[in-house]
Amino acid sequence: MFGISKTRIVNSFWNFGYIIPEQMQAIVEVTHKAELKVTAHAPYDEIIAYAFIAVVGGIEHGYGISESTL
């Protein structure tokens, strides 16, 4: 059976511009209500922090993460 298994939040300036933390939180809440997982394309510390606060299940492309954020 095919279907959606997760939602991926793309939060990178190169794609569409950044979304604000409240938008990310709303996406996560709706996705979790549908019992789906959420990952975030979060390349930098600030966006990784937003994703952490929003309780995403995973970070993709966190290549700009600093030691202090780890």
Image: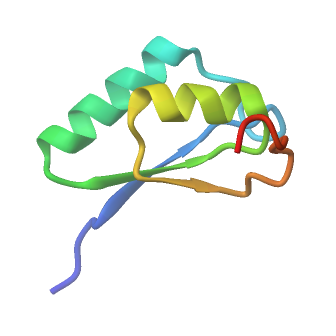
- Give the farthest residue toward the front: 68
Q: Residue at x 86, y 45 (%)?
A: 64
Q: Is residue 30 above or below residue 6?
A: above
Q: Is residue 4 above or below residue 40?
A: below
Q: Where in the figure is residue 20, as x and y percent of width and height?
A: 58, 15
The colour scheme used here is rainbow
Q: Residue at x 28, y 67 (%)?
A: 5
Q: Is residue 42 above or below residue 52?
A: below
Determine the image quadrant of residue 18.
top right
Q: Residue at x 42, y 28 (%)?
A: 54
Viewer-proximal residue among 32 and 14: 32
Q: Where in the figure is residue 68, as x and y percent of width and height?
A: 79, 35
Q: Is residue 10 above or below residue 28?
A: below
Tell whether 29 sits left or right of 65.
left
> Where's the N terminus, which quadrant?
bottom left
Q: Where in the figure is residue 66, as x and y percent of width and height?
A: 84, 41
Viewer-proximal residue among 7 and 62: 62
Determine the image quadrant of residue 65.
top right
Tell whether 49 sits left or right of 57.
right
- Give the farthest residue toward the bottom: 1
Q: Where in the figure is residue 33, as x and y percent of width and height?
A: 13, 39
Q: Residue at x 52, y 16 (%)?
A: 21
Tell whether 36 sits left or right of 20.
left
> Where's the C terminus, which quadrant?
top right
Count of numbered marks: 0
